[in-house]
Amino acid sequence: MGECHRGPGIKEVLRRAEELIRGKEVNVEYLLRLIRKHIPNSEWGVVNNAISGLETALWDLKGKLTGLPVYELLGGRVRDRVAVYADLHAGAGITETGGRRWVELASTEVAITLRIT
């Protein structure tokens, strides 16, 4: 799974990247270099946005294939706690509750998702 912001050209970039990497070993750094070498303007804009989402997906895939968490693939644990950012997109109810309900929901969801006890 990977995420990048929607925008014109994203699908085309991802299709081109797929043509380049399909059937190859999941060596994330190699695949990213290959994509950046063969797709113009990969350092900025829509191309970089698409590659960013693809990179996340490749690390996720590599983790699933190896049975390791991605942090292990990236060199191991470096901290015991991580600050979490939640973008509420100015949703209804934020100002009425002073944000307290959103904090409760976020705390519960993060605890469930990350299996924090």
Image (cartoon, grey):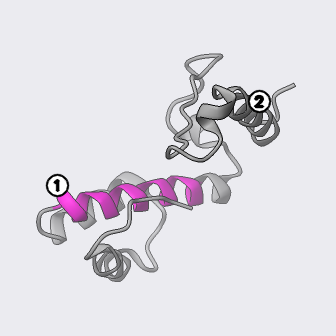
Magenta region's main secondary structure? helix
- The reply, left or right, for residue 83 in relation to residue 100 is left
Q: Which mark is residue 104?
A: 2
Mark 2: which amino acid?
Glu
- Residue 109 in percent (x, y) is at 76, 40
Q: Quadrant location of residue 83?
A: top right
From the viewer's side, name the closer residue of 90 and 38: 90
- Residue 29 in percent (x, y) is at 36, 52
Residue at 35%, 75% in the rendered image: 14
Residue range highlighted in magenta = 42-62
- The reply, left or right, for residue 58 in relation to residue 108 is left
From the viewer's side, name the closer residue of 93 and 84: 93
Q: Is residue 12 above or below residue 107?
A: below
- Residue 19 in percent (x, y) is at 34, 83
- Which residue occupies the extreme right position in the image? 117
Q: CA distance from mark 1 to mark 2?
A: 37 Å
